[in-house]
Amino acid sequence: MNTSLLCDLDLVLIQQKLSKMRISFFRSVLVLITFAFIVSSWLIVNKFSRTFTQTCHHSKTFQQGLHKLANRVHNVLNAIGLTHFLCYGSLWGQLRSSQSLPWESDIEFCLLNEEILTKDEVYLERNFRSRNMQMVYDSTEGVYTITDVAFPGGKIQLVVFEKDLVINMLRRVGWKRRVLPPDCESLPSLNCFPPRLVTPPLPLKEFGGYILPVPREGIEIQKYHYPTNWWKEILPKNC
């Protein structure tokens, strides 16, 4: 009798333990599902916000201000004798519609390092400051950024190139590229292009109501800077 009772008690205890294990297991699964849902939702929202934060069309007033700032920078560069020309997205805008692309908040000029080295950086900064503009240099990227506090949100990028005598091509400067070998085909970040495309005197074209210098041979330089898609128009994802 006692033995039977003990067996029954053991059976009850085992069933209780199994029941608790099942409850614990289901709770764990529920917690994991909830956690996975929260993480997935965060990733989706975060990706959505990153993808669609770009303004598709800046106002006409903003674009006019951006073009005016570009012309002011052009006048300074002309006055101090630095070769410069529209490039990258700004050149696309000039080629397609003679103005900045409507979603761009900056305008790019490309410059030649050999000429910049003949100027003192304090001298360059003083020239822009005397015309109410600020100049900041990013040595990692090899890019000068010109802004005006009276025109928030807009900027002019001066992208610097230098001639590589080994390959007879112009390539981007900046510390992150200094260590790279002169291999334009396998290292697209060098943004190489042949010097003949920027031999002075450069052509002048309308851009946002102003006349600015552009590279020679029209679209040719874009074939080097956009080798995989230069023949098609790439729009922001929300435009």
Image (cartoon, grey):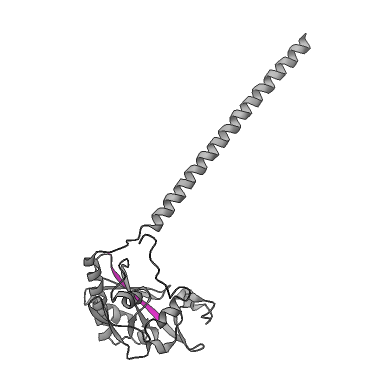
Residue 141: percent from left, percent from top:
42, 73
Q: Residue at x 55, y 39 (%)?
A: 32
On the rendered structure, is 14 left or right of 151?
A: right
Q: Image check: 140 left or right of 84?
A: right
Q: Is residue 164 left or right of residue 236?
A: right
Tell me the magenta residue range: 153-160
Q: Residue at x 22, y 70 (%)?
A: 64
- Majority secondary structure of magenta residues: strand
Query: In which image quadrant can residue 81 be found?
Result: bottom left
- Using the image, determine if residue 14 lies above or below residue 138: above
Viewer-proximal residue among 109 and 127: 109
> Where residue 136 sits: x, y (%)?
33, 72
Observer-nearest residue: 187 or 218? 218
Magenta span has 159?
Answer: yes
Residue 24, percent from left and from top: 59, 31
Membership of 26 in magenta stretch: no
Nearer to us in this view, 140 or 224: 224
Q: Is residue 161 visible?
A: yes
Q: Quadrant of the N terminus?
A: top right
